Image: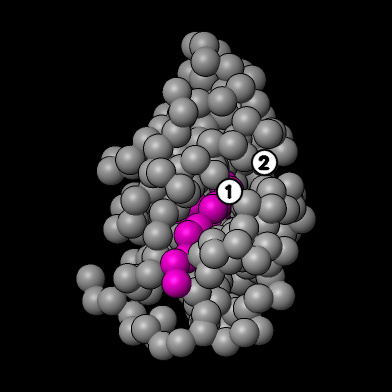
Amino acid sequence: MAVVSVFSTSIATSCLRYTTSTRPKNKEFVVFIHGFADRPYTMWKIEKQLQKEGYSVLNFDYSSTKWTMDTIVVRLHDEIVDKCKNAEKIHFVTHSYGGLIIRAYLSQYLAEIYGRLVMIAPLNQGSIIVEQFEDVPVFKKIYGPVLEKLGKDPDDYFMKYPIPEIPFGIIAGGLNNKYGFNPLIPGDDDGTLAVEETKLQGCQDFILKPGLHSTLLWQNEVIKQIILFLEEGRFEH
């Protein structure tokens, strides 16, 4: 995979407005990518805690129901190039659909300064719930054509985009039992995704935390695990 050279240049001081710390870590950026039909505010608690830890942050905003994956990837790269020019290291934290976006992004843009990636409840194996509801007219109208690419067909996104070529860890939600929250999903689940649907070969570490798909983002324990993985490449089991 070719390495993008745009980040080999020096950094602009404009990036510093994204940090609240003067610790040396402030030249390490964390890029947040929210989930499907969400907005950046869902990552707010994690973002603020990482700022307190000394990281600079970029909370990427995009329209999941209107933009194609190609458009999202280009816009994401433009944001990183513009706002992380001064970075010495760039990490990523994603939620849900954001996990597919980062897989698509890294398949096109891979740079030596990219550090570690934490995927929270990612759609790494597609979604059986999407398979069940993607043809329902009201859902198609609300969520747009992208919804049809989040299922389990061979040409859906989870099959299209490769395993990330940077160290990554996965945090899944569930009840650590055979049933989970949602009776429509086989096995343990977070109410939206089966635990098995979050898994991806090649991850450095995997951990299951009690919680629903979106509430994971607000749990102090999850944030603690994110920080540990970004710093050490592992979770605390």
Q: Amino acid at mark 1?
A: His
Crowd band around label 2 with a 10 angstrom C-alpha radius: few (<14), some (14–19), many (20+): many
Crowd band around label 1 with a 10 angstrom C-alpha radius: few (<14), some (14–19), many (20+): many
Above or below: residue 187 compared with residue 68: above
Q: Amino acid at mark 2?
A: Leu
Residue 172 drawn in magenta: no
User: Is 20 or 76 nearer to us in this picture?
Assistant: 20
Residue 69 visible within the image? no
Name the residue at 54% across, 61% down.
25
Work out which residue is located at the far front of the displayed protein and give it.
Answer: 23
Q: Which residue is mark 1?
A: 95
Work out which residue is located at the far left of the displayed protein and give it.
Answer: 1
Q: 75 left or right of 162?
A: right
Q: Which residue is mark 2?
A: 217
Image x and y of residue 23, in percent: 60, 62
Whole-number angstrom distance, CA of label 2 to CA of label 1: 8 Å
Q: Nearer the viewer, mark 2 or mark 1?
A: 2
Q: Earlier in the sequence, mark 2 or mark 1?
A: 1
Magenta residues, start to end: 88-101
Name the residue at 65% across, 26% down.
211
